[in-house]
Amino acid sequence: MADATEAGTVVPSPRIPKVLGILNIVFASALILFGLCMGLYMVSLPAFSKAMTEMVKKAEAEAEKKRAADIKALEDAEEAAETESEKQALREQRKAIEARPKVEIPMAMDFNKLGLNDPKFVAYYGVELTTALVLNVLMIVAGIGLVRRKMWGLSLGTWTAVGKLVRLVLVYTFFALAIVPTLAQKSGEVAGEMMIQQQRAMGLPAPPGIDAQFMVRMYYIMYTVTAVAMIVFGSIYPAISLWLLTRPGARAACDESQLPPGKELNETW
C-alpha cells in the first residue's frame, strides 16, 4: 500500500492502524490463551508423571498377586487330586505359570528424568512465559489504541513489535544454546529406557544395538530446529507490523494535529 502525497502533505492511511489493531487483539488473545494452557500443562507434568508411575506399580503388584494366587490354587488342587495323572497335569500347569517371566508394564515417560524440574529450565520457562504474557497484554492495549487511531496506540504497537522481535531472538537463542544440550541428552536416555521396557513387557529380550547417542543427536537436531523455527516464523507478524506502523500514512492517520478543521479521527479522511 503506497503512501501518496498532495502538496507535500502525507495522505493518511486509516486502514493500516485499524486492520493491525484488530489483528493485534485477535492474535494476542489467542497467544495468551495458548500460553496459559501451556503453563498449566507444564505445571501438571510432575503430578501426572507421579500418578502414572503409581498406577503402573499398582498394576504390576496386582498381576503378581494374581500369579501367586493361581500358583497356590494349583498347589492345593494337586494335593487334593486322587490320581497321579491329575496331579501330573496340575503340576505342569503350575510349573508353566512359575516359568513365566514377571509381568513388567511399560512405564510412562518420567518427565522428571527429562530435567524439567531443573532450576535452569524452570527459570527459563518462567521468563519465557512471563515476557510473552506481558508483551501480549501490551499488544492488546496497542490494538485498542490502533483501532481508535490514537498516536499512543501506534507508538505502543511499534515498540511492542520491536520487543517481540528482540524477545524471540534472546529467548530461543538461549534455549538452543543452554537448554537443548541437556534436554536432548536426557530425552535420548529416557527414550532408550522406554524401548527396553516395552521389549521386556512383551517378553522379548532388549533390542540389540540401541545407540543412545543416536537418539540424543536426533533430539538435539529436533529441538534446535524448533528453536530456529520459532524465531523465523514468530518474527513474521511483528516484522510486518513494524514496517506498516512506521509508514508515514499510518502515522498521519493517527496524528490529530494533521486533522482538517471539524474532522475527527473516527471519520474516514
Image: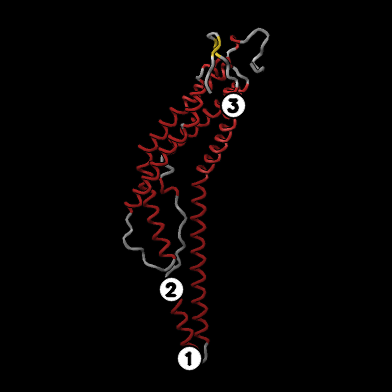
Tell us which disc is closer to us: 3 or 1: 3
Residue bearing mark 2: 100
Q: x and y percent of residue 216 in the render?
A: 35, 49
Query: In the image, residue 127 lies at what x, y percent?
Result: 46, 32
Q: Quadrant of the C terminus?
A: top right
Measured along the vertical axis of the image, is residue 227 above or below residue 214?
A: above
Amino acid under label 2?
Arg
Numbered circle sitting on residue 85: 1
What residue is pinned by disc 3? 19
Label 2 or label 3, whichever comes before in sequence order: 3
- Find numbered disc 1 in the image and state the secondary structure of the residue it sits on: helix
Element at label 2: loop
Indicate whether 57 appears above or below 125: below
Which of these two is toward me, 211 or 115? 211
Q: Is residue 150 visible?
A: yes
- Of mark 3 and mark 1, the one earlier in the sequence is 3
- Say what amino acid the circle numbered 3 marks: Val
How far is disc 2 from disc 3 in space, using C-alphas?
69 Å
Q: What residue lies at 43% left-to-right and 38% top-to-bottom?
A: 229
Instruction: Confirm or deny contact between disc 2 and disc 3 (CB under 8 A).
Output: no
Indicate left or right for 43 with 189 as reference: right
Residue 197 vs 130, above or below: the answer is: below
At label 1, the amino acid type is: Ser
Q: CA distance from mark 3 to mark 1?
A: 89 Å
